[in-house]
């Protein structure tokens, strides 16, 4: 039985889907991910934090736009395990 796991912002910051502007996104909808795989970056006070997958599964939703300002606990990804 599959279940949905939400990945939420651990703190406020700017959300980045790519490691650099000229590189592809870390993940897209439909991608299979491993537990602890890097999904995105969150910049807070000039420090980049890696957002990692809490579970193995498939990305079924990307709720945040690239370079969006997120608040603590905003939904970023939904993973189906």
Image: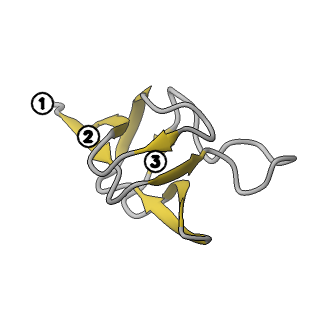
**What element does badge 3 sit on?**
strand
Task: Give the residue at mark 1.
Answer: 1
Separation (CA) of disc 3 from disc 1: 18 Å
Marking on residue 11: none
Q: Quadrant of residue 27?
A: top right
Which residue corresponds to the image point at 63% horizontal and 48% vertical from the top-left? Answer: 26
Comparing marks 2 and 1, which lies closer to the viewer? 2
SS under mark 2: strand
In front here: 75 or 34? 75
Q: Is residue 57 left or right of residue 29?
A: left
Give the Cα separation between the discs numbered 2 and 1. 17 Å
- Nearer the camera: disc 2 or disc 3: 2
At 51% across and 27% down in the image, what residue appears?
Answer: 29
**Answer yes or no: do the residues labelled 3 and 1 have beta carbons within 8 Å?**
no
Neighbourhood count class around disc 1 (C-alpha, 10 Å): few under 14, some 14–19, many 20 upward: few
Q: Position of residue 24 (x, y in %)?
A: 76, 42
Crowd band around label 2 with a 10 angstrom C-alpha radius: few (<14), some (14–19), many (20+): some
Give the numbered dot on residue 6: 2
For image coordinates 40% across by 64% down, the residue present is 36
Residue 68 lies, in percent from the top left, at 55, 38
Residue beneath label 3, please? 33
Observer-side mark, 3 or 1, equals 3
């Amino acid at each position: 039985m599959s279940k949905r796991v939400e990945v939420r912002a651990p703190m406020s910051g700017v959300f980045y889907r790519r490691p650099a502007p000229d590189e592809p996104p870390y993940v897209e909808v439909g991608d299979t991910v491993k537990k602890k795989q890097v999904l995105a970056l969150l910049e807070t006070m000039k420090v980049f934090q890696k957002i990692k997958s809490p579970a193995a599964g498939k990305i079924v939703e990307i709720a945040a736009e690239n370079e969006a300002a997120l608040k603590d606990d905003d939904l970023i990804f939904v993973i189906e395990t």
